[in-house]
Image: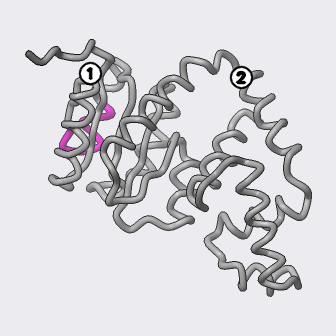
Amino acid sequence: MSVNPPFRGEIYVVDDDAAAREALSQALRDAGYEVIHFADGAALLTETRMRTPACIFLDAHVEGSPLELLKKLRIEDCAAPIFVASARANIPMAVDAIRNGAFDFIAKPFCASEIVARVDAAIGTQARVESVEEIRQISQRLEARLTPREREVFAFIATGKTNKQIARELGLSARTVEGYRASIMRKVGAKNATELVRRVLDSGRGG
């Protein structure tokens, strides 16, 4: 006899990719979340004005402007962590999403169970961050980890440049840039460039 997991909150989803939407929704329901789908960003915005979900999942290519939707959600003080996903993901797109209020950026195709774990972590993080001052302290600690040259290299990484392109811009060898990139990821605790951008920019919101 199966036992339903305890209710853990509502997840709002705007995604016209049926296969990805259904896989994600089933995984979230199995984890105890209620999933509510919206046809477009306007419908989502209307609902968030009345109540705040535990989390929001938004496809970057839904009709309208997802980035404008992100801005509106933040202007209206929607406290829910927002995930943006894309099947045509790249670093500049991730940067734009995070700068405009996304908590995390996800490349499709994704593993639904992994996304559930990231949603759990995002909701936990929101609960732990209690003040703007705490966010500011996190940002200061992260900035202290990177040397001035590493911050310079990161700026190029955030625009999607390759190691060779960065090397030309800074007058370094590609191998040296590769070393800086590896050092930055190790210090920040990121596994790839997209996660690196999310962690650094997200930590800087309280600056």
Residue tagged 2: 132
Q: Nearer the viewer, residue 135 or 70?
A: 135
Q: Nearer the viewer, residue 76 or 148?
A: 148
Query: Which mark is in front, 2 or 1?
Result: 1
Residue 39 located within the stretch drawn in magenta: yes
Q: The N terminus is located in which quarter?
A: top left
Indicate which disc, 2 or 1, sits on the residue closer to the N terminus.
1
| Horizontal side of residue 139 vs 127, given as left or right | right
Residue 70: give x, y in percent of width and height: 45, 43
Residue 169: give x, y in percent of width and height: 81, 82
Element on which disc 1 rests: loop
- The answer to which quarter of the image holds residue 49 is top left
Residue sticking out furthest to the left: 1
| Amino acid, disc 2 | Val
Instruction: Name the residue at 32% across, 18% down.
Output: 9
CA neighbours of label 2 inside 10 A, class few (<14), some (14 to 19), many (20+): few
